């Protein structure tokens, strides 16, 4: 793995989200941008400069910002609220539950620097945000895999009436050929690669690593399917159950705690459906991490191409 997160030969795009938000706001006058004193790090400086009359920086007061967003939504606006993932979820959880999820207000919560993508240490590492947001009734939870999907997701979120939480890496993000011709639809997972021996369900940045792991396994004679689960709620139970039942071997990969995120969602779905299979969760173990570069953290805590490939080997060989 490179010093960033993804393989060194992966093309990237800069500020895909920020540009997409400006584009949809120009087409939709009801779209407004709310910030919490993190304008540059959330790419909303582009919105501020392009459409300043619909840009609102409310300072480091995330709970208040959620209330303001809920009020604007009730007045007919489509507020996109921006801060770091850890502040968007842990710090304002009660306000999100009571002012956004419960009344189903049309608020879009944008969480940046999820999981171990921040060097800011434990205070800035959102390794439980998916678990928190998944637990809220009425909340849609999204994590796009690359720049193209990020742009498509912004349009889909603006068209969808209801509360959404989307987590995003700031700045430079991967650009994958596998997403080029695929339409984005909330709640529908994408089979990026077919395979009969094991299936890897991944979300966000881990999709790029899952594809690299599948390439590595292919050279060993193991055919790994790769599924991009960009919507964690509502989850695409049909695809998950179908591929898990077909292969009998499942690996989940997420930039999040192994508790409560994608791995838990997939396991719950298979349990409820009565699908019998072997499984391994790749993600942050049940521990707080530390402050370091994302590349170092992903390697240390087992969020790597090799970790995914090794999980596939183990789940495909139950005697090991």
Image (tube, grey):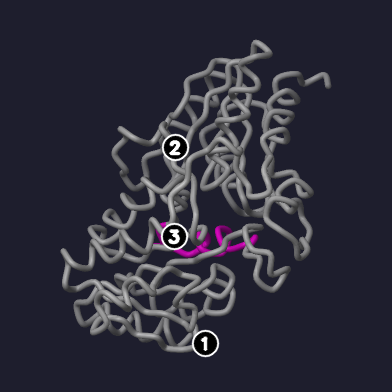
* 1 and 3 marks in contact (CB < 8 Å): no
Q: CA distance from mark 1 to mark 2?
A: 35 Å
Does 182 sit above or below residue 48? above
Please tell me which of labels 2 and 3 falls first in the chain: 3
Q: Identify the mark at residue 68; answer none if there is no mark.
A: none
Q: Is residue 134 magenta?
A: yes
- Number of residues whose C-alpha sits closer than 10 Å to that of mark 3, classed few (under 14), some (14–19) or many (20 or more): many
- Number of residues whose C-alpha sits closer than 10 Å to that of mark 1, classed few (under 14), some (14–19) or many (20 or more): some
| Residue 22, quarter of the rendered image | bottom left
Q: CA distance from mark 1 to mark 3?
A: 20 Å
Provide residue 44's location: percent of width, then percent of height: 39, 72
Does 296 sit above or below residue 275? below
Q: Is residue 71 magenta?
A: no
Please tell me which of labels 1 and 2 falls first in the chain: 1
Q: Which residue is mark 3?
A: 166
Q: Identify the mark at residue 176; answer none if there is no mark.
A: 2
Give the magenta part as a residue range: 127-140
Q: Which residue is mark 1?
A: 60
- Nearer the camera: disc 1 or disc 3: 1
Q: Is residue 257 left or right of residue 68?
A: right
Q: Residue at x 55, y 30 (%)?
A: 211
- Number of residues whose C-alpha sits closer than 10 Å to that of mark 2, classed few (under 14), some (14–19) or many (20 or more): some
């Amino acid at each position: 793995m490179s010093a960033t997160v993804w393989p060194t030969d992966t093309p990237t795009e800069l500020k895909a989200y920020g540009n997409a938000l400006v584009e949809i706001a120009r087409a939709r006058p009801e779209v407004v941008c709310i910030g919490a004193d993190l304008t540059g790090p959330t790419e909303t400086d582009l919105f501020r400069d392009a459409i300043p009359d619909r840009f609102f920086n409310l300072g480091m007061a995330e709970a208040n910002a959620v209330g303001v967003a809920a009020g604007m939504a009730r007045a007919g606006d489509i507020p996109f609220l921006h801060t770091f993932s850890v502040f968007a979820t842990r710090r304002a959880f009660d306000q999100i539950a009571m002012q956004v999820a419960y009344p189903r207000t049309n608020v879009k919560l944008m969480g940046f620097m999820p999981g171990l993508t921040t060097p800011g240490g434990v205070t800035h590492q959102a390794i439980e945000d998916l678990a928190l947001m998944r637990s809220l009734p009425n909340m849609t939870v999204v994590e796009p895999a690359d720049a193209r999907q990020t742009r498509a997701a912004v349009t889909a979120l603006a068209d969808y009436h209801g509360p959404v939480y989307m987590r995003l890496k700031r700045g430079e993000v991967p650009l994958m050929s596998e997403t080029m011709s695929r339409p984005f639809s909330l709640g529908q997972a994408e089979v990026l690669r077919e395979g009969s021996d094991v299936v890897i369900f991944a979300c966000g940045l881990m999709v790029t690593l899952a594809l690299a792991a599948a390439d590595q396994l292919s050279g060993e004679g193991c055919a790994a399917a790769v599924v991009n689960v960009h919507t964690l709620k509502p989850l695409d139970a049909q695809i998950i159950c179908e591929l898990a039942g077909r292969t009998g071997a499942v690996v989940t990969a997420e930039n999040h705690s192994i508790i409560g995120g994608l791995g838990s969602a997939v396991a719950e779905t298979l349990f409820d459906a009565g699908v019998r299979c072997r499984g391994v969760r790749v993600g942050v173990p049940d521990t707080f991490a530390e402050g370091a570069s994302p590349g170092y953290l992903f390697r240390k805590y087992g969020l790597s191409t090799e970790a995914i490939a090794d999980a596939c080997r183990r789940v495909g060989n139950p005697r090991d």
